Image: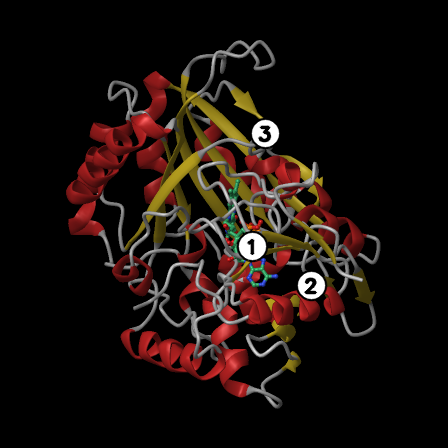
Amino acid sequence: MTHYLTEMDPEYDTERLGYNLAVEHRPAVIAVAERADDVVAAVREARRLGLGVAVLATGHGPSRSADGQLLITTSRMRGITIDPARRRARVEAGVRGGDLVRAAAAYGLAPLSGSSPEVGVVSYHLGGGLGLLGRSLGWAVDHVRAIDVVTADGVLRHVTPATEPDLFWALRGGGKGTLGVVTAIELDLHPISRLYGGGLHFSADRAEEALARWAEWTRSVPEEMGSSVLLIRMPDLPVLPEPLRGRYVVHVRFAYTGATADGERLVAPFRELGPVTDTVAEMPYSAIGTIHAEPTHPVAFHARNRMLRDLDAGAIAALLRHAGPDADAPYLLELRHLGGALARPAVEPSALGRRDGEFVLYVGAAADPADVPALRARYDELFTDIAPWATGGVCVNFLSGPDVGAAELASGYLPDDVARLAAIKLAYDPEHVFRTHHGLA
Ligand SMILES: Cc1cc2nc3c(=O)[nH]c(=O)nc-3n(C[C@H](O)[C@H](O)[C@H](O)COP(=O)(O)OP(=O)(O)OC[C@H]3O[C@@H](n4cnc5c(N)ncnc54)[C@H](O)[C@@H]3O)c2cc1C
């Protein structure tokens, strides 16, 4: 029997909350799913009650609130099956990145993980999946082989290129909360068990040099090298080491699958700049989550992003004007290096066809509701200044929060794909049962 909760139940409040508290769900009913059957029953129950259906896995990428709808929580669906011979994993809807990394590592295999082990594997893939090894192996969604999904008619479908080609195409890149509730995905794993990775922190007086060196260096690094840069004023917390505590720093992160000696050569130009911390070393792939070491405590987080085609001296000056050591930016700014396999078309095409960015520019901050308008204005000022270097696109997976508009979301896709996604949405969900996620039109 599927377990349902309403406001009258004491568990209602903990069940409706996820990591990002910027979007608070007050659903009419919560369906606590433990199996695919529960999801089928919940979608049918929502139809019977005339309610919309929303999904919550971990809450790392919420869109609009599920107020008054039926919210299906998937966090108890934690099954992982590894087939080492086929190098394949079957992953249920509530599995987090770190769980899958650990399960695959037992066989010397790896999924294409993102920066945070806390993020849900299924939704990360549905939105594209920008992993730390993406430059050599592509978007994580390119490695999805099958998807089990409950569509608006309450039917559980096993979706592959052979069974439902349109749905298979659309779910991969365009499937976050819009086309059905995915109960499990099957994906390829990779024979990777180690990395040369970690990060270097630079103090404020090295910020410009570190950023400029990184931008120049990205022009020639091999595809086996993934990297990113974070500009941030660290909180004044006693748990932080003295060189970071309360200070403005630049964090340059690396994930390299080549030989350690080559990795050391590639990282050497940064070590010459005198970092204040250095964690770059040989590590097991299972430690990949320590590279970005993102916070895990729930917060109300507001983030935006833009794809950039280049990072020349003008772009760097603009970024530092807004988020350099003297700017007092109320947000953190991150740049991830794309290119390589991330810029190439997938063997099996998906909705994630727009692949023209060389960098993702991501900005984010925890903010109280009263401060959000001012924060958004600061993001807009930055994006206006950086527009000459922008592609006009966004990274779909990094879009979250209620203020993401249809045009902004559409800019993450190729124009023809936006029309195809809308047509597939209409075919599979004509009554707009899945209405919480940002719509394309
Ligand atoms: C700290 C942090 C680090 C991140 N790092 C990366 C990264 O390195 N690379 C990257 O690509 N992205 C990254 N992201 C973005 C992240 O991948 C997306 O926000 C993703 O959608 C989060 O999924 P979730 O299940 O954890 O979160 P949730 O908020 O639970 O889900 C996000 C949305 O996905 C939909 N959804 C969830 N489960 C299902 C399902 N079973 N079926 C259908 N729809 C579903 C729902 O509409 C939901 O609103 C990061 C986000 C955070 C906060």
- Which residue is identified by label 3? 297
- Would you name the residue on which mark 2 appears? 190
Q: Choose between 60 and 2: the one closer to the eye.
A: 2
Are dots 2 and 1 in contact, CB under 8 Å?
Answer: yes
* Contact, mark 3 vs mark 2 (Cβ under 8 Å): no
Q: Is residue 240 above or below residue 395?
A: above
Q: Nearer the viewer, mark 3 or mark 2?
A: 3
Q: Residues within 10 Å of mark 2 (few under 14, many from 20)?
A: some
Residue occupying image coordinates x 51% and y 45%? 25
Above or below residue 374? Residue 277 is above
Which label number is shown at residue 133? 1
Three-letter code for the amino acid on which mark 2 is drawn: His
For the residues labelled 2 and 1, the Cα–Cα distance comes to 11 Å
- Residue 273 in percent (x, y) is at 42, 24
Query: Is 4 in front, or is 15?
Result: 4
Question: Eyeballing the image, is 120 above or below 409?
Answer: above
Q: Earlier in the sequence, mark 2 or mark 1?
A: 1
Q: Residue at x 42, y 46 (%)?
A: 336
Which amino acid type is marked by label 3? His
